[in-house]
Image (tube, rainbow, N blue to C red):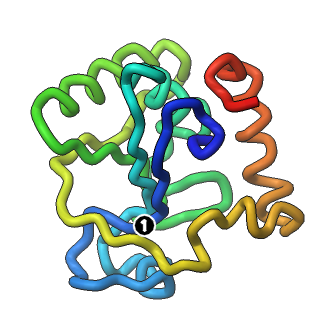
Amino acid sequence: MYRKTRGVSSVVSGYIGGHTANPAYREVCSGTTGHAEAVAVTFDPATVPADVILDIFFATHDPTTPNRQGYDVGTQYRSAMFYLDPGQEALFRASIARHQADWTNPIVTEVVRAPRFHAAEDYHQDYYAKHPWEGYCQVIINPKLSKARKYYSQWLEP
């Protein structure tokens, strides 16, 4: 979704928040590295407000389930936001407070100072664009994209 958002210049899939020096996908999936699967999003706030980027984050995953996203279970699937400075931390916490009204259960999204981000392997970058017909993309990702398009179409590239 972020790749199609106006003002977004970079979206990198990767891993963050763990204790292994150079994690690889299979290690992260094992749940033993402590890393979360994540995306690093770079955008121009003059084109798209940070609140919109955060709104899309909350629209495309369940922030109320610790260590789980749909059928995916483990600490690598936790809901987390990694900030670079106190301003981002405040923005993230305000976003959580704003979105709590959208959820029956409490939001459990972690807000943590960003340690080193590790870019995922090349085959994970642009995964959906490369494999749109795979079952996971059809069953899990497409409904999330439809929901985000419904509410954020004004921010998307034509």
Residue at the image position 45 percent from the left and 63 percent from the top: 37
Asked whether, in this view, residue 117 is left or right of residue 8, the answer is left
**In front: 113, or 122?**
122
Could you say which quadrant of the image residue 59 lies in? Answer: top right
| Rendered view: 93 above or below 75 | above
| Rendered view: 71 above or below 150 | below
**In front: 81, or 50?**
50
Could you say which quadrant of the image residue 130 lies in? Answer: bottom right
Residue at the image position 38 percent from the left and 67 percent from the top: 15
Of helix, strand and loop, which one carries label 1? strand
| Rendered view: 115 above or below 85 | below
Residue 26 at x, y percent in the picture: 50, 86
Asked whether, in this view, residue 64 is left or right of residue 94, the answer is right
For the residue marked with disc 1, what is the amino acid? Gly
Residue 116 at x, y percent in the picture: 21, 65
Asked whether, in this view, residue 97 is left or right of residue 145, the answer is left
Could you say which quadrant of the image residue 46 lies in? Answer: top left
| Residue at mark 1 | 14
Residue at the image position 89 percent from the left and 64 percent from the top: 133
Q: How packed is label 1: few (under 14 Cα within 10 Å), some, or many (20 or more)?
A: many
Residue at the image position 33 percent from the left and 43 percent from the top: 81
Question: Split into 4 quadrants, where in the image is the N terminus?
Answer: top right
Residue 126 at x, y percent in the picture: 63, 63
